[in-house]
Every structure is written in C-alpha cells, then in structure tokens.
Amino acid sequence: MRRAVVRGRVFPQSYSTDRRYGRLSLKACALFPLMWANADDQGRLSGDPEEIKYACCPNIGHVTKADIPELLKGLEVNKLILVYDTPHGQTIQLLDWWGVLR
C-alpha cells in the first residue's frame, strides 16, 4: 500500500485519557501511536503483520512480528481500528482518524 505520510503528524493528546487506550496491553500502547504516524493520508495501513512490524516498529525488539495479530485484535476489540479485507489483502483503518484530523 502506498503511503503518503504527513510531516509533523502528532499522536492526539486525547488518547492519554481515553478509556479504550487505557485497556490496551503495554505492547499495544506502544504500537498504536506508531501506526498513527505511519498511516496514509486517509488513516489506513496494510493489515499484514510483517509490513506493520517493519514499517512501524522495526527496532522495537519487544514487539515481534508474531505479537502483531494479537495486538491488532486488542486494538479492534477496543474500537480503535477496523481490520477489513480488500483485493490486495487486509487493510487497517484508524477509526478516530477523521474525528481528530479536521
């Protein structure tokens, strides 16, 4: 998936008090802001665990490629992301993208 990353994108401060974010594991808390920073201009990312690992957190040894599917489930259960199928494979939509970036 092509990425058009906005320079200077900042992870929203509102997540510091968001109950959904507070329910996540520490690994998911580490991954989610990095997904936010690496999403395209529509708030989407590839849903492939290998692509997520090497695009978002290649140098974080505590988050492995094997961890990614479970971390995504936690993010989806807490309604922070939506994982859906496309002809090119799974895609992730950051659900708060348009509410935060107006």
Image (cartoon, rainbow, N blue to C red):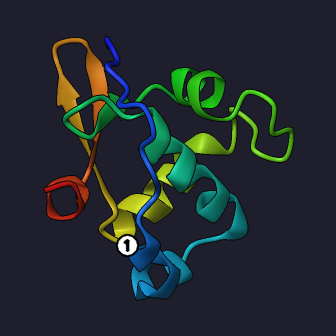
Judging by the rendered image, the residue that carries numbered circle 1 is: 78
Q: Position of residue 9 (x, y in %)?
A: 42, 44
* Near-viewer residue (101 or 65): 101
In the visual, does 9 lie left or right of 34?
left
- Residue 93, horizontal then vertical, whole percent: 25, 44
**Picture layout, residue 44 above or below residue 100:** above
Look at the image and tell me in which quarter the N terminus lies. top left
Q: Is residue 36 left or right of residue 54?
A: left
**Going 36% across and 60% down the picture, which residue do you hit?**
76
* 90 or 12: nearer the viewer: 12
| Residue farthest toward the right in the current orientation of the protein | 61
Residue 70 pos. (x, y %):
57, 52
Q: Position of residue 72 (x, y in %)?
A: 47, 51
The residue at 54%/83% (across/down) is: 22
Q: Looking at the picture, which amino acid does disc 1 mark?
A: Asn
Q: Residue at x 46, y 25 (%)?
A: 48
